Every structure is written in structure tokens, then in C-alpha cells.
Amino acid sequence: MNRTPPSDPSQVALRTLLAQVRAYIEYQQSSGVEAFPRTTGSVFPVAVSPVAGSGHAVPVQASASQAAPSPGTPQSAPPHTATHVAPVATDLFVLPGVQQAGTLGALREEIGDCRRCKLWSGRTHIVFGVGNPQARLMFVGEGPGRDEDLQAEPFVGRAGQLLTEIITKGMKMRREDVYIANVIKCRPPQNRNPEPDEIAACQPFLLRQIELIRPQVLVALGTFAAQTLLGSRVPISRLRGHWYDYHGVKLMPTLHPAYLLRNPNDKKLVWADIKMVLSELER
Ligand code: SF4
């Protein structure tokens, strides 16, 4: 049968979500899982909305699968418009042990030698996160690269060095004062973008990290992290520079340091975003 792709954004979101659910279930079945626990909700009551007065229509609760072209790459931007609303797939797969983890250490123990998605087979280390468990500022990137995989720490390669400079030289903070994590905890092969089932499997860990740290400000680094956290397909070029409410935490999307390495002229955009973050932290 010749199927015409849906043009309605909500139908696109629904189809994407169903594909995500199917891929996740098939993978779990292939790993020997026979049933899923019944859940009563997500780690957070899922709702993402623009900060009042920002004047921006923000897509809410879209599928995490709609993430990104290349990490942190902004795209040319038509006028900002609202898109669609759809549930986040992690709602379906909340893991009771993850929800019960009361500290970051307990959460790391719960993750264990995780094989909940296919990325386990290519990793050297799980890259859980690093920093102050009571940090007021938390950065979220995409996933580990080669250096991070080898050292079991996020943002330690060239892009990580630039992020460290932003924190230390730009923000006059210490790297150990903030918390740094990724959406995905294991390195995808050849640094490809994470796939929907991988995001669905791993995202509960990040959500619990955010809930435990409860930072005052979240900074989403690059297209992938911003679109995943906001459940949006809006390009980073239009998301950045504006505040969003992420379950009660103020979220600022900005460009990924890896993008800045390739496009140093855009550092001024990140600095503008970081100045907004600093002013929020000083309030
Ligand atoms: S990426 Fe996340 S869900 Fe997948 S194996 Fe690693 S820790 Fe587990």
C-alpha cells in the first residue's frame, strides 16, 4: 500500500512515538524481558512550557526521537511557531528502582552494568556525570565521545575543554561547582546520533539526576540535548537565548561547544546566553 507521510505535526509525533515504543519493546524482548512494570507516571510530571512573558510559543512534550541533526549544529530558522504536543516515551518506561534512588550514588548503583539498550556493547565505561550533587547549575550534553568513554567523565575532550573554559574563565566558577551530564550515558558507535530506543532507555537516568540535583538553572548544550529535554523539533538557533520552564527548573538552550570549535564566530552567541544564566544565578 502506498502510504502518504502525514503532514499534521501531531500525527508525525504519534507515528514517531509508536516507532520508538516498538523499537524499545523489540529490543527488550530480544534481551529476554518478558514484561514491563506498570507505572503511574514519569519521574517528573511531564510538562515543559515557556517562561511567562518570554513571548515564545514552545513545543511541549514531543517525542524524544525527534532529536537532532548533528550535535549542536544550529540551522537556519523560519519564524518561531508552536509545533505539536505529544507524550515523552520515558513515561512508559519509568523504572521503579530509578525512581526510588535517593542519591546520585544510589542511582549510579541502580544503573549498574546497564544493558538496557544496545549501546552497552560498544562502550568502555558508562559516563554517568560529574560535579557537585547540590549544584545550582547543571549542563546537559548529548552523549560521550571517545575521550569521555575512555575516561568515564563527560566533556573531557576538546569540546569539554572549551566548556571548562566557559565555566572557569567566562563564568568565574569552578568545574567542580557545577554538574555535567549527558542525555545518553554510553558512547554511540562512530559518535552517531543516539537512536530513539536508546534515548527512551536512558532518559529516565537523566531525569532522575535532574530531580535529585534540582539545580536552579539547566543549560542544554546543543541541538540534541535541547530538543530532547524540550521535546521539540525547533532548531537550536531559535531555541537558544530564551528561557524555558523544565518542570520548575529554568532551562537555557545554547550552542554545543563542539559546534563552537568549528564556528568560533558564534562564541558571542553562547556568551550572550551565559550572561543570562549568570544573571539568573545571581538573583
Ligand atoms: S546508553 Fe543508557 S540505557 Fe543504554 S546501555 Fe548505556 S546506560 Fe544503559
Image (tube, rainbow, N blue to C red):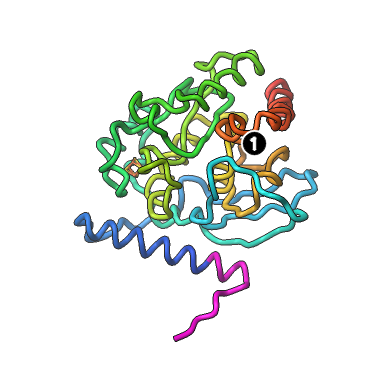
* Mark 1 Cβ inside 8 Å of ligand 1: no
Q: Decide whether residue 56 is among the magenta residues.
A: no
Q: At label 1, which amino acid type do we have?
A: Thr
* Quarter of the rendering occupied by the C terminus: top right
Q: Above or below — where is 242 with respect to 232?
A: above
Query: What residue lies at 62% left-to-right and 73% top-to-bottom?
Result: 7
- Residue to which mark 1 is pinned: 254
Q: Where is residue 173 in the image (x, y as percent from the top left)?
A: 60, 14
Q: In this view, does 277 lie to the left or right of 157?
A: right
Q: Decide whether residue 6 is among the magenta residues.
A: yes
Query: What residue lies at 62% left-to-right and 49% top-to-bottom?
Result: 48
Q: Is residue 84 left or right of residue 200?
A: right
Query: What residue lies at 62% left-to-right and 72% top-to-bottom?
Result: 8
Q: Where is residue 71 in the image (x, y as percent from the top left)?
A: 53, 42
Question: Residue 167's image quarter?
Answer: top right
Q: What element carries label 1?
A: strand
Q: Position of residue 183 (x, y in %)?
A: 46, 40
Q: Above or below — where is 181 with respect to 2?
A: above
Check disc 1: other Cα within 10 Å, few if <14, some if 14-19, many if 20+. Answer: many
Q: Which of 45 and 175 is in front in this view?
A: 175
Q: Residue furthest left?
A: 32
Query: What residue lies at 59% left-to-right and 48% top-to-bottom?
Result: 230
Q: Above or below — where is 153 with respect to 85?
A: above
Q: Above or below — where is 211 with respect to 21?
A: above
Q: Which quadrant of the frame does ligand 1 lie within?
A: top left
- The magenta segment: 1-13
